[in-house]
């Protein structure tokens, strides 16, 4: 038996009590603070659901054609999305896409500025690195408990949980990408009198873009992988179908919903990769 | 070069230490402790030691040294991409080390521009936008940026490539873009860090010529870094030779070639084609020059004896008439009978071009100044000795 060094019960009670205190005293304020996020998320979801299915599939195919100038990718993407609809999961698929896109956007809004700060300051990097490790490895249920306590089950805690898990890659790769920018180019820009901001906008960010794009891709994939957990706290979507499959012991439902998630992942991964490749070739500074 | 004018750039006692405890290393370096000892004692690297010199406006000042000599560190002091550990640098009388952030940016935008060995072009911008970058930083209107950038692109011979991206250009073309970018802002000072070193020899030659001809028109103050002695001799009004962070010698190309301060420099410039850089005026010896009018045998003999030479040049109305040799004097009894016609060359002619003249005739070649006055002469022996001198010196 491990010796009891101090009374953990009172320690844990203290934590729980302070959580309760925050919920009772600050719950309403916090919920109000997050309501714009909820409104945005609902608007995005409603908007995508309002579009007829063929318009949405057409738009995704069109984007992938613009990126690759090739019919192979749009064709594959179109077939996969069509199949998801064909097995009866179209609305869930759109809800999942909405949550994934929203989580990705929020992750970029947080991750890119922090990534830039990490690349410029050793102190920020030293603080952020272990934090990112914790965010990626800590089981999401642990922070879902207080999130649900504060905000109630629903889309916003699901979004927060997804963002906490998915923000790390874009932050890490923004940092890496900027630090890997050819120092000669940054020096040249400096020698012509560029300030820190101009250095960032004219040289560092554009040259780091392919690496940042790889981070965005990973962030999207990680956001997708969170949909099952997110649906446990009321996010709906394909994850909810998987949950129902478990609850009703319906193998077919779980399997089809799972495969749909995989198909969705393939669609967004291929589009993001194609875009990253295109950026890489248009940027690359190697001789010929 | 006008030595009485106020100097453009003045460096005083620059030390640059790379490491964590520069103060300690600085003290040792000032006492003259060697680079290796300072490294082993303090872990700091002495990049530059006690650098002081002045640069005149319009001068092309070459800093030559091997890799690790500190030359790239030194040139970055002139736009403060590198800060000195101690010492002062003034440009037009203004201390640039004391400049605040905003003033420094302004200084970099207006006063000084730089060309880099690895070009440092923005890969996602077109040639036009790259060349316009300095103008953008100066805050000029868009139309003016485009117009001036286009002008400088055509000046460096890249007209028609405005819309290309750097990756579509060869190394030489990329460096032309780098040069155009540096010239477009009309900064008075041009810093060139091994600008041509990454180019293949043929392109490098072209670029050197282009820079020399542009410089003739523009008269900028150029600081040029190179490890190539031929390039230094070709472009430099003065050359500073740097070794392990210290200046070994500063002088004109001729001084460096003819009077190297130490063995290191002699070895460094050994491979330089002397016949290309030395001129007739620098190696000629003086012969007596006599006017044809009133020339007598006795006067000629006396002049030869005085100067201990075997020839005199004879002029007619101030212009060269020919050469009178001792042998010819002894054969003929008349004073002016033995005048042989000989060729002449300008003082500025490189020895490379004088040698064919010398080879064709056994008589000395007269060296004349811009007004056509005879100022000296070159014999085969003198010419060959001066071409071979350095080789003999360094192998001795």
Image (cartoon, helix red, strand yellow):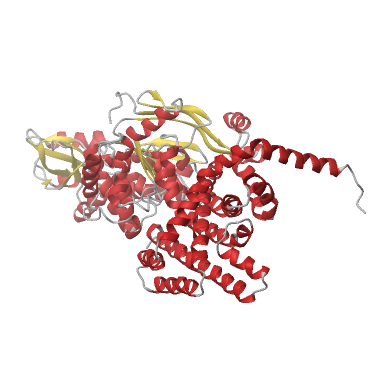
Whole-percent x and y of residue B20? Answer: 62, 36
With A174 as the anchor, is B130 left or right in this view? left
Q: Residue at x 69, y 55 (%)?
A: A139
Q: Quadrant of residue A261?
A: bottom right
User: Where, quadrant-wise, is the N terminus of chain B in this rendering?
Assistant: top left
Please indicate whether residue B269 sits to the left or right of residue A84 in the image: left
Q: Is residue A285 above or below residue A192?
A: below
Q: Is residue B377 left or right of residue B264?
A: left
Judging depth in this view, the residue of B156 and A263 nearest the camera is A263
From this viewpoint, which residue is outermost toward the front? A248
Q: Position of residue B245 (x, y in %)?
A: 51, 38
Q: Is residue A8 visible?
A: yes
Q: Which picture quadrant has residue A246?
A: bottom right
Q: Is residue B180 above or below residue B160?
A: above
B197 in relation to A72, above or below: above
Give the camera-side residue of B96 and B55: B96
- View extreme (bottom): residue: A252
Residue visible at 52% across and 66% down?
A: A265
Q: Position of residue A287 (x, y in %)?
A: 39, 60
Q: In the displayed structure, would residue B44 be above or below residue A133?
A: above
- Can residue B44 be seen here? The reply is no
């Amino acid at each position: 038996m491990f010796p009891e060094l101090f009374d953990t019960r009172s320690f844990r009670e203290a934590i729980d009590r302070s959580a309760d205190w925050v919920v009772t005293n600050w719950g309403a304020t916090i919920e109000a603070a997050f309501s714009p996020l909820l409104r945005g998320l609902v608007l995005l979801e409603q908007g995508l659901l309002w579009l007829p299915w063929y318009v949405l599939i057409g738009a995704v195919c069109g984007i992938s054609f613009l990126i690759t100038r090739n019919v192979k990718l749009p064709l594959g993407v179109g077939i996969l999305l069509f199949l998801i609809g064909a097995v009866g999961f179209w609305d869930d698929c759109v809800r999942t896409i909405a949550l994934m896109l929203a989580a990705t956007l929020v992750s970029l809004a947080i991750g890119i500025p922090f990534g830039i700060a990490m690349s410029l300051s050793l102190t920020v990097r030293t603080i952020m690195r272990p934090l990112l490790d914790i965010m990626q490895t800590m089981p999401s249920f642990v922070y879902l408990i207080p999130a649900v306590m504060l905000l109630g089950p629903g889309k916003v805690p699901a979004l927060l949980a997804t963002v906490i898990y998915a923000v790390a890659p874009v932050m890490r790769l923004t940092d890496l990408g900027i630090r890997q920018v050819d120092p000669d180019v940054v020096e040249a820009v400096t020698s012509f009198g560029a300030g820190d901001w101009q250095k960032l906008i004219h040289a560092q960010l554009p040259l780091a873009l392919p690496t940042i794009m790889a981070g965005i891709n990973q962030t999207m994939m990680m956001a997708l992988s969170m949909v099952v957990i997110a649906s446990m706290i009321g996010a709906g979507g394909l994850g909810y179908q998987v949950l129902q499959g478990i609850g009703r012991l319906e193998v077919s439902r779980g399997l089809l919903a799972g495969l749909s998630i995989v198909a969705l992942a393939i669609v967004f991964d291929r589009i993001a990769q194609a875009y990253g490749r295109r950026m890489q070739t248009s940027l690359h500074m190697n001789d010929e | 070069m006008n030595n009485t004018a106020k100097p453009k750039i003045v460096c005083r006692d620059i030390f640059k230490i790379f490491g964590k405890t520069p103060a300690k290393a600085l003290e040792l370096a000032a006492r003259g402790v060697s680079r290796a000892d300072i490294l082993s004692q303090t872990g700091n690297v002495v990049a530059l030691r006690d650098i002081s010199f002045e640069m005149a406006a319009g001068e092309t000042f070459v800093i030559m040294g091997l890799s690790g000599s500190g030359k790239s560190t030194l040139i970055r002091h002139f736009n403060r991409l590198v800060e000195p550990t101690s010492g002062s640098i003034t440009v037009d009388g203004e201390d640039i080390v004391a400049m605040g952030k905003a003033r420094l940016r302004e200084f970099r935008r207006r006063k000084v521009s730089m060309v880099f060995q690895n070009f440092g072009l923005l890969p996602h911008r077109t040639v036009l936008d790259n060349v316009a970058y300095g103008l953008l930083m100066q805050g000029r209107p868009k139309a003016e940026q485009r117009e001036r950038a286009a002008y400088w692109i055509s000046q460096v011979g890249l007209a028609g490539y405005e819309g290309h991206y750097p990756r579509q250009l060869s190394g030489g073309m990329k460096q032309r873009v780098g040069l155009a970018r540096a010239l477009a802002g009309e900064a008075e000072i041009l810093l060139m860090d091994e600008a041509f070193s990454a180019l293949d020899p043929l392109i490098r030659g072209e670029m050197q010529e282009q820079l020399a001809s542009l410089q003739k028109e523009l008269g900028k103050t150029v600081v040029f870094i190179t490890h190539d002695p031929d390039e230094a001799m070709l472009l430099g009004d003065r050359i500073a030779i740097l070794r392990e962070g210290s200046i070994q010698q500063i002088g004109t190309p001729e001084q460096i070639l003819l009077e190297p301060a130490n063995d290191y420099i002699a070895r460094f410039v050994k491979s330089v084609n002397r016949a290309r850089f030395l001129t007739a005026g620098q190696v000629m010896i003086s012969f007596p020059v006599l006017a044809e009018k009133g020339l007598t045998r006795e006067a000629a003999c006396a002049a030869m004896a005085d100067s201990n030479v075997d020839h005199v040049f004879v002029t007619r109305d101030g212009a060269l008439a020919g050469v009178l040799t001792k042998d010819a004097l002894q054969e003929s009894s008349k004073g002016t009978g033995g005048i042989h016609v000989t060729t002449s060359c300008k003082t500025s002619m490189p020895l490379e071009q004088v040698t064919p003249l010398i080879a064709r005739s056994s008589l000395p070649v007269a060296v004349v100044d811009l007004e056509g006055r005879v100022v000296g002469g070159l014999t085969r022996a003198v010419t060959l000795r001066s071409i071979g001198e350095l080789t003999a010196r360094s192998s001795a």
